[in-house]
Image: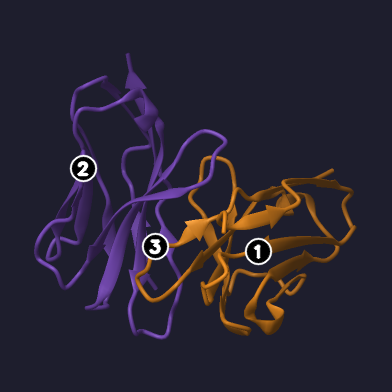
Chain colours: A orange, B purple
Amino acid sequence: DTGVSQDPRHKITKRGQNVTFRCDPISEHNRLYWYRQTLGQGPEFLTYFQNEAQLEKSRLLSDRFSAERPKGSFSTLEIQRTEQGDSAMYLCASSLDTGGEAFFGQGTRLTVV
Amino acid sequence: AQTVTQSQPEMSVQEAETVTLSCTYDTSESNYYLFWYKQPPSRQMILVIRQEAYKQQNATENRFSVNFQKAAKSFSLKISDSQLGDTAMYFCAFLPVGAGSYQLTFGKGTKLSVIP
């Protein structure tokens, strides 16, 4: 296994369009996180999955955002009706257990024009 | 809710010298983990070092060590013998244990430049 994989690496979309990102975690990791990072800031938590269950979602997360992790494997993050403020790097991370090292993917950079 | 504060937006150090990055946090939890992550330019974030709150001994990983002061809620990172490859953003992060929250909360980061 080569680590956490995210696709696409870059996405440019027009305002109002929907976008979907994919994350493939390290295969034996049951915990999966999505984060958003804007320039010059630390990653901001979006949501967390343990296996297929979405156990936590940021209160800052608009209802235009939805995430899934069918069968506890890969995960998708969808943003509906994108806005310019959604422009950011979207990071996925996975870990094996509590306190375990979270391995990050290289991220998907979203630009909304 | 937890907060993590990194008060040094940017720092620089001469190659081979020692530098200390500061981090303070606020929490009511008694059990948690603290981390330092490194994010090189245009590259993915990687773990530098981890500290478990119930362990009094400070963690060390080769040239990297921490000074964990639980009562003061302080968690600084010391980099010895700085190398050019240490140039990166460094993020301090907090993870509660058993509190029903799984958020890994990050500070805003410190940009470290190692000068030849």
Position above or below: A100 against A72: above
Residue designated by label 1: A24
Position above or below: A60 against A2: below
Mark 2: amino acid = Asn
Q: Earlier in the sequence, mark 3 or mark 1?
A: 1
Q: Chain of mark 3?
A: A
Q: Secondary structure at mark 1?
A: strand
Q: Position of residue B24 (x, y in %)?
A: 26, 55
Pick out the residue farthest to the front.
A1
Mark 3: amino acid = Glu
Q: Residue at x 48, y 50 (%)?
A: A42
Q: Position of residue A13 (x, y in %)?
A: 86, 48
Q: Chain of mark 2?
A: B
Crowding at mark 3 (Cα within 10 Å: few <14, some 14-19, many 20+): some
Residue B55 location, quadrant: bottom left
- Give me the C-alpha separation between circle 2 and circle 3: 17 Å
Residue designated by label 2: B62
Crowding at mark 1 (Cα within 10 Å: few <14, some 14-19, many 20+): many
- Give me the C-alpha separation between circle 2 and circle 1: 31 Å
- Give me the C-alpha separation between circle 3 and circle 1: 17 Å
Mark 1: amino acid = Asp
A42, A3: nearer the viewer: A3
Image mark for residue A101 = 3
